[in-house]
Image: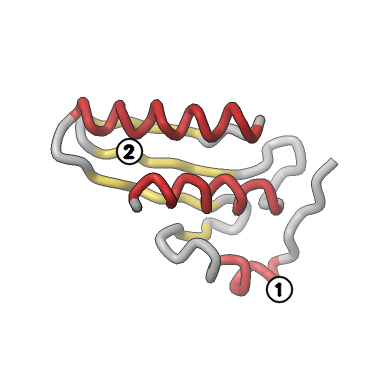
Amino acid sequence: MATLIAQTNLKEMMKRVPEWESKRTAIERTLEFDDFNQAVDFVNAVAEIADEAAHHPDIDIRWNKVRLVLTTHSEGGLTERDFQVAEKIDTLEE
C-alpha cells in the first residue's frame, strides 16, 4: 500500500512537477501537439512509462490535445507513485 501525501506537503511536492496542476486528490496536465498523430505518439510513450511503473494515468485525447490525470485510485488520492510517473512523463518533452 502506498501512503497518501498530506495536503500540507502537496505544495512542496508540486515543485517537482511544475507543469502539472494540483486538483486536491489528483494532478493533471494538458499538452498540445501539432496534430493527432503526434498526440497519439505521445500517448503511446506515456503508456510505456505507465506499464513499466504499473501505475496508469487517466488519458483524454482531443485531436491534438492530451489531458493526463494521475491519482492513486486504490488509496483515494495522491501518493509518491503519482509524482514519480509525472516526472518520467515530463522527460518525454526533453
Image x and y of residue 68, in percent: 44, 41
**Secondary structure of residue under mark 2:** strand
Residue 35, located in which quarter of the rendered image?
Answer: top left
Quadrant in the picture for the N terminus: top right
- Seen in the image, is 84 located left or right of residue 86? right
* Residue beneath the point at 50% across and 28% down: 48
Q: Which residue is mark 2?
A: 66
Q: Which percent across, then down, holds residue 94?
A: 35, 53
| Side (left or right) of 26 relative to 93 | right
Q: Residues within 10 Å of mark 1 (few under 14, many from 20)?
A: few
The 10 Å Cα crowd at callout 2, few under 14, some 14 to 19, many 20 or more, is some
Q: Residue furthest right?
A: 1
Element type where label 1 sits in the image = helix
Q: Tell me what residue is drawn at x 32 percent, y 38 percent.
A: 66
Residue 43's label in the rendered image is none
Whether 10 is drawn above or below 92: the answer is: below
Question: Does residue 87 sit above or below 8 in this rendering?
Answer: above
Residue at the image position 34 percent from the left and 49 percent from the top: 93
Q: Which residue is mark 1?
A: 8
- Give the residue type that dot 2 points to: Val
Q: Earlier in the sequence, mark 1 or mark 2?
A: 1
**In the image, what residue type sits under mark 1?**
Thr
Q: How many marks?
A: 2
Considering every residue shown, the one lying at the far front of the view is: 94
Q: Quadrant of residue 10?
A: bottom right
Q: Position of residue 39 (x, y in %)?
A: 27, 33
